[in-house]
Amino acid sequence: RIGISSGASAPEQLVQNLINEIKKNCNVSIEEIVVAEENQIGAISEINGTAIIKNKDSEERDTTLFDPIFLNDEIIVQGNSSITLEFDDGTSVILKELTSYKVTDYINAKSSPSFYSEVSSGKVIVETGSIAKKQSGKMELQIKKSNLSLKGTRLNASLNETGQLDVSLGEDNFGNTGLIEMTSDGQKQSIFSTNQVLQVTDEGVSAREKTD
């Protein structure tokens, strides 16, 4: 129960008492809570199985539905699990089992927005939001030595245990297809067809038709 003392209005006293309770029970300051909210870039919208999050200070925490995502959080999905992340520009990222994913730069602004992330293992499906769809926006995904630049599209990328990377383009929820520009070991190629797959191995980059 939170009491209200005399000499202060009910709303003012209630707010102050709530602040005191948060400080006492959560061992954090209001300033820290405000900063955390301001630095949040997304949240977990769906989780099947288990995953952990490692922050920039290498502190680990378990994941639950609607957990916030912050810059430089590394999301590590366990076996037989998957997780979906929703970012505040409308981007949706599905992480399949044994995937490690991190957002390294995120600026959702009206002018020159940017979204940079990296995958060190596993499989991701990215449905781009407003940043990748803006003319001045830049959205890039780094997977080992390959850099993928996304323009208003749906991306499927899979990195297997041998280091082989398969990248393909898909239709978004509105039936539209965009463009993926890939740079790998100095080679530049573009994907503009949903029937095309770019494959990256130690021997280089090759293209093939999608079979599944």
Image (cartoon, helix red, strand yellow):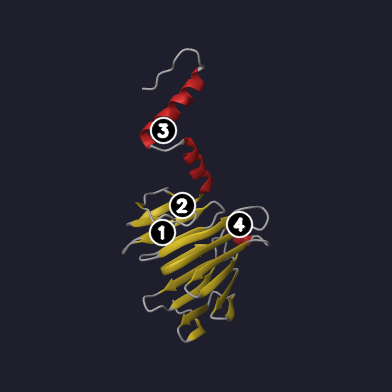
Q: Is residue 113 left or right of residue 78?
A: right
SS for dot 1: strand
In which quadrant is the N terminus drawn? top left
Return the residue nearer the eye: 68 or 197.
68
Identify the amino acid type marked 4: Ser
Name the foreground residue: 195 vs 68: 68
Relative height, residue 164 to residue 140 (above, below):
below
Q: Amino acid at mark 3?
A: Lys
The disc label shown at residue 176, or none: none
In space, the residues marked 3 and 1 are separated at their CA atoms by: 28 Å
Classify 10 Å Cα crowding around label 1: few (below 14), some (14-19), many (20 and above).
many
From this viewpoint, which residue is outermost toward the top? Answer: 6
Of labels 4 and 1, the one closer to you: 1
**Structural distance between the alpha carbons of marks 2 and 1:** 9 Å
- Given the image, on which type of amino acid does mark 1 rest? Ile
Label 4: element kind: helix
Are the two marked residues, 2 and 1, in contact with CB atoms closer than 8 angstroms?
yes
Identify the disc placed on residue 69.
2
Q: Split into 4 quadrants, where in the image is the C terminus?
A: bottom left
> As drawn, is 57 to the left or to the right of 179?
left
Circles 3 and 1 in contact, beta carbons < 8 Å: no
Dot placed on the residue nearer the N-terminal end, 4 or 3: 3
Q: Marks 2 and 4: CB-CB under 8 Å?
A: no
Which residue is denoted by mark 4 in the rendering?
130
Q: Nearer the viewer, mark 2 or mark 4?
A: 2
Pointer 1 residue: 75
Give the number of the mark in front: 4 or 3: 3
- Distance CA(mark 2)–CA(mark 4): 18 Å
